[in-house]
Image (spheres, rainbow, N blue to C red):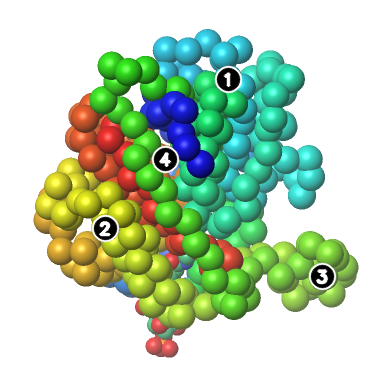
Amino acid sequence: MIAKYTAKISGTGMYVPKKIVNNFDMEKLVDTTDEWIKTRTGMSERHFIADDQSTSDLCYEASIKAIEKSGIKAKEIDMIIVGTISGDYSFPSTACVLQKKLGLKGFPAFDIAAGCTGWIYAMSIAQQFVENGVSQNILVVGAENLTRIINWSDRGTAVLFGDGAGATIVSRADSTDISKIIDTDLTADGTYNELLIQPAGGSKMPASEKSVRENLHTIHMEGNKIFKHAVKSMYSVCDHLLKRNNLDVKSIDWLLTHQANLRIIDALGKKLKIDKKKVIINIEKYANTSAATIPIALDEAIRNKKVRRGDLVLMASFGAGLTAGGLLIRY
Ligand code: UT7
């Protein structure tokens, strides 16, 4: 596709629910220790959704902030894409529920199910729609409420997840803008689709007394196998983005990857040979919020004045599917 326009991130926002559950609280819920969680994952606490909240509420709060930051009016949004695998319903999409909550209508709104890579997949789609001139301001949200589908009988997964949402406005840039979405790289290897799965609730295994009794509506994950795939696939998308854009890793100002495990982030940083000071990490506060980890960390880094206008930011994620994706921006 020949791009008619350039796309940029014009605003970001994030929201996490109020309730904080730390590792010591987790010790009361499953057979685990603060020490194990910290040393094996880097996590200290996570936020749990309130009983009267759902994923679209998290999206709404993050979106309001992103819209405000971007300087556009809500009615200037002409597409909504939500990356989520834990939406309000199987259908309709959480994007349509969010559209209603924002008081908007009359333009496309849809969800992307790419696991933790959902926000990066959604950003890539948004980039295409802005570059080809069809859209001018797209609201892209990564949001997840995985704590409602935790398998409390599996300590290997129960401690890993938190709830939250990160929102981004992707807008048409004008000729004076230095900010731009430079490139994205998406991939998937469906051979491994069963390594990270919610087995029941879909057409293959509709809800039944048995599926509930056997905990099959919860998260099932083979963590070890995914760990290896994570480093390899994120390295590969980063390598493609750097090579395709003739960039040396030294020119990257910030590396921001999916926050699933500190050891995965460290291993990727080492493989890429990037300066440790350039790696953005917030896993200790929010744990794994799946599709929301990167947009949450990006918003935080912008508000903390780590990431500044003009900085080159390399992002990468991996997740259920198994999917992987990279995103290179000049913020
Ligand atoms: O975002 C989506 C993608 N998902 C991921 O990125 C997850 C990737 N995988 C991982 O992050 C890691 O594999 C985990 C954090 C899930 C697990 O860490 P690990 O170092 O791979 O642990 P393990 O599964 O190999 O288990 C090692 C030991 C086992 O005990 P034994 O058999 O050696 O006695 C587990 O039973 O640690 C035990 N264990 C725990 N102990 C205390 C597992 N979970 C816990 C726990 N507390 N929560």
Sooner in the amino-acid sequence: mark 2 or mark 1: 1
Name the residue at 37% across, 36% down. Answer: 181
Label 3 neighbour load within 10 Å: few <14, some 14-19, many 20+: few
Which sits earlier in the primary sequence, circle 3 or circle 4? Answer: 3
Q: Which residue is pictured at 68% across the width and 16% down the height? A: 103
Mark 2 nearby-residue class (10 Å; few <14, some 14–19, many ≥20): few
Mark positioned earlier in the residue sequence (3 or 2): 3
Asked if the beta carbon under badge 3 is closer than 8 A to the nearest atom of ligand 1, the reply is no
**Residue named by callout 2:** 243
Report how far apart the C-alphas of labels 1 and 3 lie in the structure.
36 Å
Of residues 131 and 97, the one nearer the viewer is: 131
Dot label at residue 148: none
Q: Is residue 94 left or right of residue 175?
A: right
Q: Position of residue 270 (x, y in %)?
A: 18, 67
Circle nearer the viewer, 3 or 2: 2
Residue behind mark 3 = 204
Q: Which residue is mark 4?
A: 295
Residue 98 location, quadrant: top right
Residue plotted at (53% across, 65% down): 188
Q: CA distance from mark 3 to mark 2?
A: 41 Å
In primary-sequence order, the first of circles 1 and 3 is 1
Q: Read off the residue under disc 1.
A: 77
Type of amino acid at the residue the image marks with label 1: Ile
Of the numbered discs 4 and 2, the one sitting upstream in the chain is: 2
Amino acid type at mark 3: Lys
The secondary structure type at the circle numbered 2 is helix
Residue lying at 57% horizontally and 14% vertically, measured from the top left? 76
Q: Is residue 53 left or right of residue 240?
A: right
- Tell me residue 265's x, y (percent): 29, 62
100 lies left or right of 47: right
